[in-house]
Image: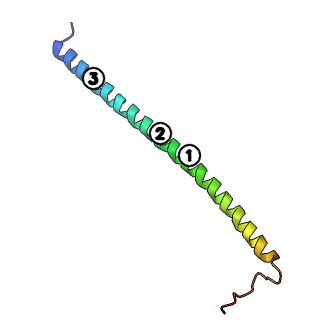
Amino acid sequence: MVNPVDDDQINADIASLQAEMAFQGDSVQRLNDALATQQQDILMLQRQVALLGEQLRGLREASSTREGATENEKPPHY
């Protein structure tokens, strides 16, 4: 026969473990959501950097094709 005190302790331990698992499940879900948001932000920033790189290349090409312009030419205020 099982001691009733042992049953109560076992039930309390089970309840404690269930609460801990629920807390950990919630924590894992929040971390997953944060990671997904960060990944979206990283992808957006990568696209923006790529676009800025293209714009910079375009500006460099446009400035190098200007009549008489050279890469090392000093601005007129020098």
Q: Residue at x 79, y 76 (%)?
A: 64
| C-alpha separation, residue under disc 2 versus residue under disc 1 | 11 Å
Q: Secondary structure at mark 1?
A: helix
Q: Nearer the viewer, mark 3 or mark 2?
A: 2
Q: Earlier in the sequence, mark 3 or mark 2?
A: 3
Of residues 10 and 30, the one nearer the viewer is 30
**Among the 4 quarters of the image, the one containing residue 28:** top left
Q: Is residue 11 left or right of residue 44?
A: left
Tag 1: amino acid: Gln
**Among the 4 quarters of the image, the one containing residue 10:** top left
Instruction: Decide: is 55 above or below 60.
Output: above
User: Residue 48 location, x and y as percent?
Assistant: 62, 56
Question: Mark 3 and 1 residues: CB-CB less than 8 Å, in contact?
Answer: no
Q: Is residue 44 left or right of residue 59?
A: left
Q: Secondary structure at mark 3?
A: helix
- Label 3: few (<14), some or many (≥20) within 10 Å? few
| C-alpha separation, residue under disc 3 versus residue under disc 2 | 27 Å
Instruction: Decide: is 28 above or below 1.
Output: below
According to the picture, the residue beneath numbered tag 1 turns out to be 40
Q: Which labelled disc corresponds to residue 13?
A: none
User: Residue 60 location, x and y as percent?
Assistant: 74, 72
According to the picture, the residue beneath numbered tag 2 turns out to be 33
**Among the 4 quarters of the image, the one containing residue 19:** top left
Instruction: Decide: is 41 above or below 5.
Output: below
The N terminus appears in which quarter of the rendering?
top left
Of residues 76 and 19, the one nearer the viewer is 76
Q: Residue at x 21, y 21 (%)?
A: 9
Q: Residue at x 32, y 31 (%)?
A: 20
Tag 3: amino acid: Ala
According to the picture, the residue beneath numbered tag 3 turns out to be 15
Tag 2: amino acid: Asp
Q: Earlier in the sequence, mark 2 or mark 1?
A: 2
